[in-house]
């Protein structure tokens, strides 16, 4: 897997600026965005940073557009614009460097009869980068505001010069790109940003002469050297995320949360705190709001629902046993997979097509395992089942999320926008210099595939589909039924694998050939027939042929129907019933618990039946994390479902089974959710041993759970399916499965509205708001929260309305509407105060503090966080008191009150350790390290960072631990 590289993007406008930065880099490589934007990325010696340098051209608009693209693509921790500028002050000389403390956009305004009314825009530089500049370059540069306009200023007596002197009189320099960069960075959720300009002229009539003397390259060199010095002081900050809509600044996220495989989930500062969103009526649930919809207004479609996101694996599924009869096809396939194979295509693709059950996946897996055994793919493999022939096939966007997850890109590492996700995916493939194999199984449409194809012929793509994918630039291998001899060989090999003394094929060659004929030489039919013979060791092959020919539909397509009929009718009733009910499960693969629930039995009672069905080749055991899951081939599943549909009594039995499965899923999902929210000192929830076990179950069952929520469309199952959907919220949010989150929330909202269940509908709208905000659809999220608020207000539920106002504030803050966010959190605070809910009032105070900080009102934010701290202390909520101390520390640090901030962090650290909250302790120790480093105390900083490494490791957050380790080692 590609390593995580702490990256800074440095943007430039002119070739001389680009060259000045580029010469400081080593081991540089060229990267290309899908839309053609190019950067060079290399190491910056003496620092922990990789630096990606880009030349954008001149002008603020161009800079804004390309900045947003590069940030979404490369996900940097910091952004610098390095270049040249003209001086606006007499004490600033050519060759000096100005580090922008603010960036002014000088052109905004309104022309009126009374004159031009200025409407200035201003963006502050990053506090962290500004502090790094002050310590790295004290007395060597000017830390002053910079003016930006789409104008080359070469006349100090011009009207525009007078305009700047009058309205922006503290600006020290003028240039053309900084406002575009600052605006784009602002939209990327407080990405650390700094503009650094070397002075090449005095913005007067002497500009042309200065430029001709070579002042621009010299000024660019000075600015680049200043940038290098700043980055030598600036350190990677763990847990920070750029361009995602969920900021990496520790104050910005909803949760303190650990990565995907961590044992820790801290919901102390989440709007999902308290009772879960899916709790039944009468229990307090959190909500979010907006300001436009009223109950009774027409519905609008918000978001898009679809089937569950698949799971991609970095390990191939097991190679099929008893593979035979495809030697010629294998000989055609393997040379195409060889990494050294000659090709004129930009990417090497091989597509295996054929009828269902014909052996496409078996051939693809057999070839893939052989290739891996030969060492052809040292970069690894990726496998994903696209479920192309299910009712809800996997989309390319969903497969992308699964593939990124297999790459290790999850949690805060995962970009929010689809465009950025595809860019990251292609970057990961490009960075992987060693050949990889991508196996995309069971595709039905080129649209599922095309966006996922690598942009290099270094890797190989292997696809299976029932269709010939002629629209792809792929080598096509069409599979037909087996030859008569190969079909007979498959049965023979299958029998011998079970019992090497089974000589029936040799004793009955004519019957063997006839069995192949009645099976249509179709591999799946042959395997089922062989399983029948294995189960009845002493029956003759000829007797089986006679039984098959006696079935009612010997002419059915593929000759499968008579095989299925005979296999089904020979099953004992308990096995036949279980097969029918498994066909009705949400997806084709279930665990033993779900299988047992379908027929009202325990897993232990069901396991022998499953093993018997597996022996009959009607279900396939799938080893998974030390356990076994059970999968139906889609043709077997379709057959069994048709049996149910043909008989009213079986249909009723099936609906009862669906209800049983929903009850099972709901009880387990609630228990798992309780484990996710569990805090030390509280009773340990039941059903799972611990939080990792609960999360492992949710991960394994996610596809089934998401699919089960779609049963909410059936009134008979609407209530249970809705409650599952509302209980999945915290899990799907934490894992960042936002597509699934939208799908389940929308299903719950629609079902609740159809049932006129206003309470659940409000909760569902609120949850949908979370999902939409997480997926980057902030305006739609605000609309969803509005509906939630209005429903709870109409019902007179002031607590839920208060929660809705609080959540609305979070969405508005994400949208950059700080003033409205402050108003929303204030309304939440006041409502909670009126109802006497001091703890939730404290939460509202804390969120109000976040909004105030984002608006630049740091002193007010500090007061809000202190109020939150005091309320949580008064109610005995130590865990939230600790979070409030943490935010108090951030606010104090921002106001320059270093020693008080350190004390606040220590208070939080004490509480984290009290609760064994090692992930929270890691975050707080990381912040302590940063503040000590900024204060010029490298020894204390290194001690704090090393303690953070230990804490993150105890929390299972290995990636965070590794990042902090790099930061600590940079001080040695």
Image (tube, grey):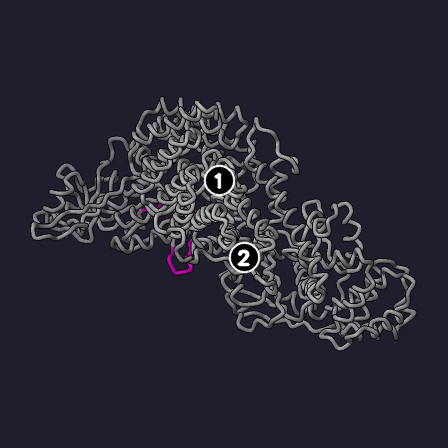
Q: Is residue 683 above or below residue 958?
A: above
The residue positioned 63% from the left and 52% from the top of the image is 315
Residue 31 position in % (x across, y down): 42, 55
858 left or right of 389 in image: left
Residue position for label 1: 285
Q: Which mark is residue 399?
A: 2
Residue 747 placement (x, y as % from top left): 52, 54
In magenta segment, residue 33: yes
Q: Secondary structure at mark 2?
A: helix
Tell me if I can see residue 281 in this picture: yes
Residue 170 drawn above or below residue 209: above
- Residue pictured at 79% horizontal, 74% vertical: 552
Which corner quadrant of the image does residue 373 belong to? bottom right
**Farthest bottom residue in view:** 555
The picture places residue 191, in percent across and down from the top left corner, at 36, 43
Mark 2 crowdedness (10 Å alpha carbons): few <14, some 14-19, many ≥20? many
Q: Which disc, if any, is residue 59?
A: none
Question: Would you say 855 lies left or right of 351 here?
Answer: left
Report the side of 345 relative to 185 (left or right): right
Q: Which residues are magenta?
A: 21-38
Can you give x and y, in whole percent of width and height, for residue 516 in the image?
80, 73
């Amino acid at each position: 897997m590609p390593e995580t590289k702490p990256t800074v993007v440095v943007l430039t406008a002119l070739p001389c600026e680009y060259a000045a930065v580029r010469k400081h880099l080593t081991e540089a490589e060229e990267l290309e965005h899908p839309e053609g934007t190019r950067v060079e990325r290399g190491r910056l010696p003496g620092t922990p940073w990789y630096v990606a340098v880009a030349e954008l051209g001149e002008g603020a608009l161009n800079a804004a557009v390309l900045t947003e693209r590069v940030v979404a693509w490369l996900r940097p921790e910091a952004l610098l614009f390095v270049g040249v500028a003209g001086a606006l002050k007499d004490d600033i000389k050519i060759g000096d460097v100005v580090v922008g403390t603010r960036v002014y956009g000088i052109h905004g305004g309104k022309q009126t009869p009374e004159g031009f009314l200025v409407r200035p825009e201003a963006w502050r530089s990053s506090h962290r980068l500004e502090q790094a500049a002050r310590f790295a370059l004290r007395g060597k540069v000017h830390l002053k505001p910079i003016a930006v306009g789409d104008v080359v200023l070469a006349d100090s007596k011009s009207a525009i010069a007078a305009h700047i002197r009058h309205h922006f009189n503290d600006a020290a320099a003028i240039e053309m790109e900084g406002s575009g960069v600052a605006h784009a960075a602002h939209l990327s959720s407080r990405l650390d940003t700094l503009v650094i300009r070397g002075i090449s002229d005095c913005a007067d009539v002497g500009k042309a002469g200065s430029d001709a003397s070579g002042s621009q390259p010299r000024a660019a060199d000075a600015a680049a050297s200043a940038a290098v010095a700043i980055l030598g002081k600036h350190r990677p900050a763990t847990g920070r995320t750029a361009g995602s809509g969920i900021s990496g600044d520790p104050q910005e996220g909803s949760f303190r949360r650990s990565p995907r495989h961590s044992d820790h989930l801290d919901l102390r500062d989440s709007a999902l705190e308290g009772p879960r969103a899916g709790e039944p009526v009468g229990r307090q649930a959190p909500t979010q709001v907006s300001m436009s919809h009223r109950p009774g207004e027409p519905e609008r479609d918000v978001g898009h629902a679809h089937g569950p996101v698949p799971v991609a694996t970095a390990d191939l599924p097991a190679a099929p046993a008893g593979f035979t009869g495809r030697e010629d096809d294998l000989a055609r396939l393997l040379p195409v997979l060889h990494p050294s194979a000659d090709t004129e295509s930009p990417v090497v693709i091989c597509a295996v097509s054929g009828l269902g059950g014909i052996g496409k996946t078996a051939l693809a897996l057999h070839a893939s395992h052989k290739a891996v055994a030969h060492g052809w793919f040292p970069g690894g493999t990726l496998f994903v089942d696209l479920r192309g022939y299910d009712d809800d096939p996997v989309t390319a966007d969903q497969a992308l999320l699964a593939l990124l997850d297999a790459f290790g890109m999850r949690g805060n590492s995962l970009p929010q926008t689809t465009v950025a996700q595809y860019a990251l995916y292609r970057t990961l493939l490009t960075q992987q210099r060693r050949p990889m194999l991508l196996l995309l199984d069971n595709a039905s449409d080129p649209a599922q595939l095309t966006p996922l194809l690598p942009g290099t012929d270094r890797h190989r793509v292997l696809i299976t589909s029932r269709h010939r994918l002629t629209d792809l630039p792929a080598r096509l291998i069409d599979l037909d039924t087996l030859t008569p001899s190969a079909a007979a060989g498959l049965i023979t090999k299958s029998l011998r694998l079970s019992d090497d003394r089974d000589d029936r094929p040799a004793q009955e060659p004519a019957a063997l050939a006839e069995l192949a004929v009645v099976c249509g030489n179709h591999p799946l039919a042959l395997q089922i027939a062989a399983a029948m013979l294995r189960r009845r060791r002493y029956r003759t092959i000829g007797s089986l042929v006679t039984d098959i020919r006696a079935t009612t539909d010997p002419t059915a397509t593929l000759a499968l129907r008579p095989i299925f009929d005979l296999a089904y009718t020979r099953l004992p009733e308990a096995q036949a019933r279980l097969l029918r009910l498994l066909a009705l499960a949400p997806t084709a693969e279930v665990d033993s618990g779900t299988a047992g629930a379908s027929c009202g039995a325990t897993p232990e009672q069901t396991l022998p039946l499953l093993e018997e069905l597996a022996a009959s080749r009607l279900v396939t055991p799938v080893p998974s994390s030390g356990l076994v899951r059970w999968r139906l081939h889609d043709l077997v599943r379709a057959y069994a479902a048709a049996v149910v549909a043909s008989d009213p009594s079986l249909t009723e039995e099936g609906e009862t089974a669906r209800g049983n499965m929903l009850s099972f899923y709901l009880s387990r999902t609630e228990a798992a959710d309780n484990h996710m929210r569990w805090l030390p000192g509280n009773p340990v929830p039941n059903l799972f041993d611990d939080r990792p076990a609960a999360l492992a179950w949710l991960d394994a069952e996610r596809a089934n759970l998401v699919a089960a929520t779609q049963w909410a469309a059936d009134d008979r199952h609407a209530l249970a399916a809705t409650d599952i959907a509302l209980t999945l919220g915290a899990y799907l949010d934490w894992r960042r499965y936002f597509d699934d989150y939208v799908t389940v929330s929308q299903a719950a909202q629609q079902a609740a509205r159809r049932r006129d269940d206003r309470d659940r509908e409000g909760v569902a709208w609120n949850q949908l708001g979370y999902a939409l905000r997480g997926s980057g659809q902030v305006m739609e999220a605000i609309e969803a929260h509005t509906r939630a608020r209005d429903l709870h207000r109409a019902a007179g539920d002031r607590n839920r309305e208060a929660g809705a106002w609080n959540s609305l504030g979070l969405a508005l803050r994400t949208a950059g509407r700080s003033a409205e966010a402050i108003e929303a959190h204030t309304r939440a605070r006041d409502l909670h105060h009126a109802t006497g809910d001091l703890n939730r009032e404290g939460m509202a105070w804390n969120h109000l503090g976040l909004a105030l900080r984002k608006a630049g009102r740091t002193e007010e934010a500090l007061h809000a966080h202190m109020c939150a701290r005091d309320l949580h202390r008064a109610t005995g909520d130590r865990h939230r008191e600790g979070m409030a101390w943490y935010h108090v520390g951030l606010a104090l640090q921002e106001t320059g009150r270093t020693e008080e901030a350190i004390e606040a962090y220590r208070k939080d650290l004490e509480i984290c350790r009290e609760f064994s909250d090692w992930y929270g302790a890691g975050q707080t120790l990381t912040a302590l390290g940063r503040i000590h480093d900024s204060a010029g105390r490298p020894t204390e900083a290194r001690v704090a960072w090393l303690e953070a490494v230990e804490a993150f490791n105890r929390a299972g957050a290995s990636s965070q631990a590794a990042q902090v380790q790099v930061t600590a080692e940079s001080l040695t």
